[in-house]
Image (cartoon, grey):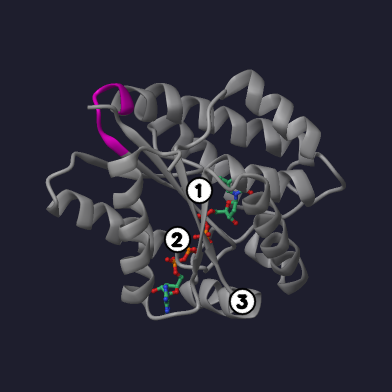
Amino acid sequence: MAGLFISFEGIDGSGKSTQAKLLAEALENAGHDVVLTREPGGSPGAEEIRALVLQGDPDRWSAETELLLFTAARRDHMERLVNPALADGKIVITDRFADSTRMYQGMRSGDLRATVDALHDLMIGREPDVTFLIDMDPDMGLSRAKGRGGTEERFEDFGADLQRQMRQGFLNLAQDAPDRIRLVDGNRDVLDVAKDVLALANEALTHGPQS
Ligand code: ADP
Ligand code: TYD
């Protein structure tokens, strides 16, 4: 059985972590072998890089350095965790992947999008089979994310305008990659969102990722 690589994307506080966990549980209960992971992070080396990029002063890194750090973390995550699990036929569910880099590093400080794509082709070289984009009102997403607290605040500090730009950017990505990205309305009860996500995941498992 071939593995399936699934990512969750969306703005901060849209419910990605909640939905990734619920999908992993549902697929495990159905008898699948599932690896639930996240970015930045997911492997010991990438988790160390996560602390470097998510903690501290918002101006800690230049946009270019930050892009290299996220890409280094992703490369390690792929080498150590994702690729071996997919080769074993497992379902890998990641909370964020390269679309986040396209948005956050590609849009934030000027236009680095072409550099992001070139580096992705050079160093990562694959997309998920299916991406769930959890779409969410930016103000609600921000208040949910702020409600969580914690120390990983470098990006959440950028505020509501950035959230709005990110939401639109993610919607544009979904339009550009309709075969891969499934849009899910996140402004609903957790379990209603989870039901839609599971149905779409089962469709991908039954008919293959391009259905
Ligand atoms: P993300 O990973 O996208 O940042 P989380 O899954 O961590 O989002 O959710 C952010 C916060 O919002 C959490 O406190 C979570 O419990 C809550 N939450 C998630 N989904 C919903 C929902 N559909 N309705 C209400 N609250 C939600
Ligand atoms: P995450 O822990 O998923 O945050 P949240 O639960 O609030 O959505 O991700 C942390 C931050 O990292 C988030 O603000 C987005 C940012 N990020 C990037 O800027 N580039 C990337 O490539 C990735 C994967 C995440």
Observer-side mark, 3 or 1, equals: 3
The residue pinned by badge 3 equals 137
The residue pinned by badge 2 equals 16
Q: Where residue 108 appears, x then y in whole percent?
A: 78, 52
Q: Was residue 42 drawn as part of the magenta stretch in this picture? A: no
Q: Where residue 129 appears, x then y in whole percent?
A: 44, 37
Mark 1: which amino acid? Answer: Arg
Task: Evaluate whether residue 36 shows in this view.
Answer: no
Mark 2: which amino acid? Answer: Lys
Q: Are marks 2 and 3 in contact (CB under 8 Å)?
A: no
Would you say the beta carbon of the disc 2 residue lies within 8 angstroms of ligand 1?
yes
Mark 3: which amino acid? Answer: Asp
Q: Is residue 133 left or right of residue 1?
A: right
From this viewpoint, which residue is outermost toward the right?
A: 110
The circle drawn on residue 96 is: 1
First along the sequence among labels 3 and 1: 1
Q: How many marks?
A: 3
Q: Are marks 2 and 1 in contact (CB under 8 Å)?
A: yes
Q: Residue at x 33, y 67 (%)?
A: 194
First along the sequence among labels 2 and 1: 2
Magenta-colored span: 86-91
Q: Is residue 199 left or right of residue 69?
A: left
Q: Secondary structure at mark 2?
A: helix
Would you say the beta carbon of the disc 1 residue lies within 8 angstroms of ligand 2?
yes
From this viewpoint, which residue is outermost toward the top?
A: 122
First along the sequence among labels 2 and 3: 2
